[in-house]
């Protein structure tokens, strides 16, 4: 073989290997991006479960106890606001929209906490089997939301680390992959809430 042919074959081989490497990295980022979307879908699933339980909880509480309407109204309003935020994968790429989503869910969680604390003052309601089941389901849902948010943050961390490291960052730039948003604690979450009876 001629020296020029060998050099040309070597260049072609290097180019093919480079393209295959780039395709492999790109496909890996696509898988990770889909992992983030899948984790987000699980978070949405748990939020939907919460939304489905709240009307039952509110109806049970209304049917058994006649207590502070402001607390009940706060739960109803917080749920309404939380359902107004559109949950889409594009939300992960928009920091302001993501923050609005977190705020609406935080307000709903806070209102539910106040509702459950207020209910402690009503022995008839606390003893109602339907309420106890709903309360247990709601507490379980809150725990599931926490777990799914943690898993989501872990997947986002892995994805963000991948798209920000060199040389992946070059492929991420060409492929349109950017860092995703994390769930973060609500402002003031480090302070324990005061429970008063």
Image (spheres, rainbow, N blue to C red):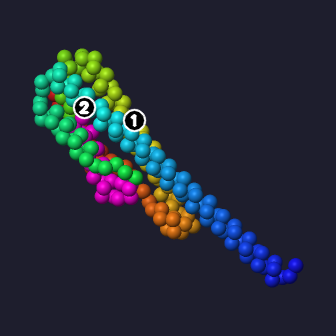
Residue 90 vs residue 110, the one in the foreground: 90
- Dot 1 or dot 2, earlier in sequence: 2
Can you say whether 36 is above or below 58 in the image? below
Picture residue at 78% right of the left edge, 75% below the top: 9
- Please state which of the two labelled residues, at mark 1 or mark 2, is closer to the viewer: 2
Q: For this view, does 184 lie left or right of residue 152?
A: left
**Residue 6 in sight in this render:** yes
Picture residue at 22% right of the left edge, 45% below the top: 81
Image quadrant for the N terminus?
A: bottom right
Residue 175, position as x, y percentages in the image: 51, 65
Which numbered marker is on residue 102?
Answer: none
- Dot 2 falls on a residue whose secondary structure is helix
Residue 181 vs residue 37, the one in the foreground: 37
In the picture, residue 20 is in which quadrant? Answer: bottom right
Picture residue at 30% right of the left edge, 31% below the top: 53
Residue indicated by mark 1: 144
Magenta part, dominant SS: helix
- Dot 1 falls on a residue whose secondary structure is helix
Residue 66, position as x, y percentages in the image: 12, 24
In the image, is residue 110 part of the stretch drawn in magenta? yes
Residue 15 vs residue 190, the one in the foreground: 15
Picture residue at 38% right of the left edge, 56% below the top: 90
Residue indicated by mark 2: 55
Dots 1, 2 in contact, CB < 8 A: no
In the image, is residue 4 part of the stretch drawn in magenta? no
In the picture, residue 13 is in which quadrant? Answer: bottom right
**Residue 116 in sight in this render:** no
Question: Magenta region: which residues?
Answer: 90-112
């Amino acid at each position: 073989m001629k020296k020029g042919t060998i050099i040309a074959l070597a260049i072609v081989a290097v180019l093919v290997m480079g393209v295959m490497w780039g395709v492999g990295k790109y496909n890996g980022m696509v898988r990770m991006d889909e992992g983030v979307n899948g984790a987000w879908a699980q978070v949405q699933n748990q939020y939907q479960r919460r939304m489905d339980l709240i009307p039952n909880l509110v109806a049970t509480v209304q049917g058994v106890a006649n207590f502070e309407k402001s607390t009940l109204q706060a739960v109803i309003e917080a749920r309404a606001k939380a359902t107004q935020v559109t949950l889409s994968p594009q939300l992960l790429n928009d920091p302001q929209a993501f923050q609005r989503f977190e705020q609406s869910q935080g307000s709903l969680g806070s209102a539910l906490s106040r509702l459950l604390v207020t209910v402690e003052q009503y022995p008839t309601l606390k003893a109602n089997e339907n309420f106890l089941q709903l309360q247990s389901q709601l507490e379980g849902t809150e725990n599931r939301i926490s777990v799914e948010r943690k898993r989501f943050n872990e997947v986002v961390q892995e994805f963000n680390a991948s798209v920000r490291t060199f040389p992946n960052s070059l492929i991420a730039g060409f492929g349109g992959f950017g860092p995703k948003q994390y769930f973060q604690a609500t402002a003031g979450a480090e302070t324990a809430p005061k429970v008063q009876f």
